[in-house]
Amino acid sequence: MPRRKILIASMMHETNTFSPVPTPLESFRPLSGEAAIAEFKHTNTQLGGFLDVAQRMDAEIVLPLAANAHPSGYVERRTYEDMCDAIVGGIRGGCDAAFLALHGAMVAEHVDDGEGELLRRIRAIAPRLPIAVGLDFHTQLTSTMVENATVITGYRTYPHIDMAETAQRAATTLVRALDGQVRPVMVWGIRPMLTSTLEHTPSRQPMKDIMDMAIEAETHGVVLNASVLGGFPQSDIPHLSCSGIVVCDGDTTSGQALLERMLDLAWRRRADFLYKSAPLASQIAHARTLTEGPVILVDHGDNTASGGTQDVMSVVAEVMRQRLDDVLVGPICDPTAVARIVSAGTVASVTMDLGGRIDMPQLNLKGTPLTVTAKVTRITDGEFTVTGPMATGVRVRMGRTAVLDTGSMQIVVSERRAEPSDLGVFTHAGIDPRRKHYVLIKSRQHFRAGFEPIARHIVLCDGDGVTSSDLSLFDYRKRRRPLYPFEPL
């Protein structure tokens, strides 16, 4: 049998349409060819999983684009077009199948369904091409995605520790189809409901039973693949929902029944998927009563991995006001502050405004800097390799990074945003978070990959920002109607 030619590509972005952070091409740090293969092989990423399957089948690999940006605002029109052109151009060059690492919640300035539009363009020039797609758990699934793919699988975890496995599930089913062993047919559906990213992780209820149904059916061969997708609420698009997709082998009867059971259970539990907020001052006051550390303070209103600016200082200010001691904070993204710190050098004492550089007009929030006086104790290049369970093996590049010490608080400040899912955001700068009483990080769930194992306590902090879990703060103009919880259903 001649070697198969497999096109592998990634174009991944979770778009927070309320975020003021721009998303130009350089945000994606695009790679291609051997450089992309070298960057992502043997990593716990979708590209790593797809590369593993292709290499095990001794396929000829074509990799026209590897592009992944931190969640932020709308993808710029030209950026989206350039990335699509790279992938579609690769398809036009000919291949036996395509493995595509996508997100499922990409919104460009001119396209509400970034993934669906890419797949539509591919299908227009390659009507019969077998296409395997891996998607994030926070996908907003659309008919355009489903109609233009052959196999779709989604992450089963949040934090996402199964990215490579998700790609392998999709690719393996597609390879079986290429070999004539199975005939993939997909069924999918939605329920018109939003689920909070603080409440819908598949590791806990109310989502656990639902995801377990999908895993059990796939594991026991009832269906080829089954996925539940929690959705991403910080996006003003027409297809907001909670959804599911099942890949069947020819006959869809069992798959359709499974799909309805999963979605019906999600719908019955819809009220349990909503986060119940509390005053920030009371949350920090509660943290003060916890005598055993580390106490992980989770500022989920300004979460990089959902499009936050990573420079909102409301939680840090409250921690200072309540005089918590032995606190580690970070990373705070403030390139202006880093430039000044680097200029001052280590051992210097600086008094400066920190954070609060970016206004958030969609939520009527003004950036509010926090004045700090601190010693500069360390300056690094901000680079490290992830050793924890999420994105294992990936090289993180935070830009120049500095450590400020106020006496009661150590603050890590970086030039670029970086989700603190791995202890490396601190350990690369010589700080062991396991030895701190309080660790204040900006995250929702991904912090659990690296920080939950070291935590004595976890305290969720309702800080300000464009990733707030208070859905009433967001002005949705394009969403479907009716949609729970906005309309009683």
Image (cartoon, grey):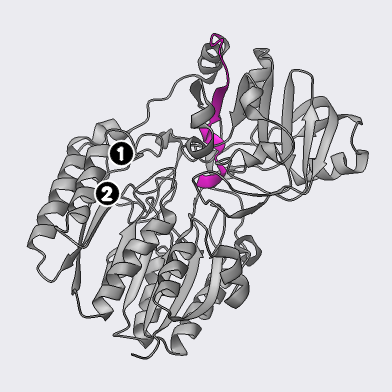
Does the segment drawn in magenta span residue 293?
Answer: yes
Magenta-colored span: 289-307
Residue 407: horizontal and vertical position, in percent?
79, 19
Disc 1: CA contacts within 10 A as few (<14), some (14-19) or many (>=20)? few
Does the segment drawn in magenta span residue 119?
Answer: no
Q: Which residue is mark 2?
A: 481
Is the N terminus in the top left, top right, bottom left or bottom right quadrant? Answer: bottom left
- What's the residue type where badge 1 is placed? Phe
Q: Could you say which is closer to the camera, residue 313 or residue 481?
A: 313
Vertical comparison of 132 with 393: above or below: below
Which of the 4 quarters of the picture holds residue 104?
bottom left
Nearest to N terminus: mark 1 or mark 2: 2
- What's the residue type where badge 2 is placed? Arg
Q: Secondary structure at mark 2?
A: loop
Relative placement, left or right, of 146 versus 35 is: left
Relative placement, left or right, of 250 versus 382 is: left
Q: Which residue is mark 1?
A: 486
- Residue drawn where x is 22% and y is 36% of the image: 488
